């Protein structure tokens, strides 16, 4: 049995790493891809995980497989594409550590995931199935993603969804919205940023927008991540803003994935059905998730920045979220 299985993109994040002696920008080769990052957090917290996705048969693809194996994320369903190269993303950071991207994905191997590449038994044996929208930008991965999540839902696996809007990967915002919305119909746990929430609902008020999605798609738990302000969540008739922790952010890559990994860890270890977890219990779980998100901004990259349980617990003990 797997605690969590995730399907989606696995790629290289080239993260800024200073200036060379020739005064050229240096970039560090970091493993990336939101679904894999979420599994990385869970694996670091000793959960059993399996990744479903595709990389190129190239040096970057082999590197990514090694990285997942080294952090104990299962790669039985990581497939190599013989034609498309591994997707590359160059990350540019502004003074606040916020990211801008350039993607090299024309096509990228992650877009080439086909239904026949998937061992559906892996999904049968998962407690949580997690996916995002980057694997829905192009065919064939778009149909494959929807098929897999439909399968997970039919098998009553708890479905976690992070629409993770990356404007540069879509033809336009309308196309993005159309497919990001499709995922909402399957979500038991929805994690969105403020920008994604507004795109999906055309409503600027967070609480109103969340209520709209909750009712329209019948989603038990909706969480909105708010960067250094923490997060907001709604579970049935309980809703709350949960502040984050004060940190010196150097790179926000993976903070949202760290947050979601932390939340899924809390839900998995509570061993309760999501419907039976009380709002007040979620508040504590989301405080834990905020702590991982905050800690992940203090280091460069996503997977290399994932903290261990001891580090998270010490951080929570030694800091107040206000
Ligand atoms: P993604 O890029 O995956 O969509 P996101 O926008 O969902 O990410 P953020 O809101 O940047 O993710 O971060 C997720 C969580 O991490 C926040 O809800 C917050 O708890 C924590 N966090 C992020 N940035 C900071 C920061 N600068 N200081 C403290 N906590 C932070």
Image (cartoon, grey):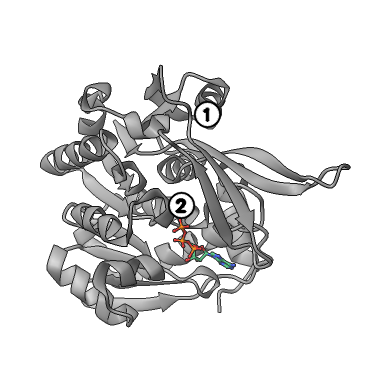
Relative horizontal placement of residue 244, taking residue 179 as reference (left or right): right
- State whether residue 273 appears in this view: no
The residue tagged 1 is 64
Mark closest to the chain's N terminus, 2 or 1: 1
Q: Position of residue 170 (x, y in %)?
A: 35, 51
Q: Is residue 62 above or below residue 240?
A: above
Relative horizontal placement of residue 156, taking residue 293 as reference (left or right): left
Disc 1 element: helix
- Where on the picture, by quarter, is residue 286? bottom left
Residue found 44% across the figure and 46% down from its top: 34
Distance from disc 2 to disc 1, alpha carbons, whole Å, reads 17 Å
Q: Is residue 11 above or below residue 183?
A: above
Q: Position of residue 258 (x, y in %)?
A: 49, 53
Q: Position of residue 45 (x, y in %)?
A: 49, 43
Relative horizontal placement of residue 162, taking residue 148 as reference (left or right): right
Residue found 19% across the figure and 69% down from its top: 214
Q: Position of residue 292 (x, y in %)?
A: 53, 57
Q: Quadrant of the C terminus?
A: bottom right
- Look at the numbered disc 2 and say if its residue's Cβ is closer than 8 Å to ligand 1: yes
The residue tagged 2 is 257
Q: Residue furthest right?
A: 21
Q: Quadrant of the N terminus?
A: top left
């Amino acid at each position: 049995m797997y605690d969590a299985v995730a399907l989606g993109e696995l790629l290289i994040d080239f993260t800024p790493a200073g200036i060379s002696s020739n005064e050229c920008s240096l970039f560090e080769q970091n493993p990336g891809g939101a679904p894999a990052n979420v599994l990385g957090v869970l694996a670091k917290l000793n959960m059993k995980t399996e990744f479903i996705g595709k990389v190129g048969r190239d040096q970057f693809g082999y590197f990514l497989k090694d990285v997942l194996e080294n952090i104990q994320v299962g790669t039985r369903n990581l497939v190599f594409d013989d034609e498309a190269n591994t997707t590359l993303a160059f990350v540019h950071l502004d003074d606040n550590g916020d990211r801008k991207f350039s993607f090299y994905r024309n096509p990228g191997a992650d877009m080439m995931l086909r239904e026949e590449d998937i061992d559906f038994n892996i999904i049968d044996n998962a407690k949580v199935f997690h996916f995002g929208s980057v694997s829905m930008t192009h065919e064939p991965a778009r149909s494959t993603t929807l098929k897999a999540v439909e399968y997970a839902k039919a098998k009553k696996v708890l479905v976690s969804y992070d629409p993770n809007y990356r404007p540069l990967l879509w033809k336009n915002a309308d196309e993005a919205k159309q497919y990001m919305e499709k995922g909402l119909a399957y979500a038991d746990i929805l994690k969105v940023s403020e920008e994604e929430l507004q795109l999906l609902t055309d409503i600027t008020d967070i609480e109103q927008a969340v209520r709209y999605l909750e009712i329209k798609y019948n989603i038990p738990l909706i969480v909105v991540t708010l960067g250094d302000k923490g997060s907001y969540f709604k579970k049935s008739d309980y809703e709350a803003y949960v502040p984050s922790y004060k940190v010196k952010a150097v790179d926000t890559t993976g903070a949202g994935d760290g947050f979601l990994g932390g939340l899924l860890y809390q839900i998995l270890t509570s061993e309760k059905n999501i419907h039976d977890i009380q709002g007040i219990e979620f508040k504590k779980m989301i405080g834990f998730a905020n702590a991982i998100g905050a800690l992940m901004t203090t280091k460069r990259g996503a997977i290399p920045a994932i903290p261990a349980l001891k580090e998270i617990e010490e951080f929570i003990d030694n800091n107040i979220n206000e």
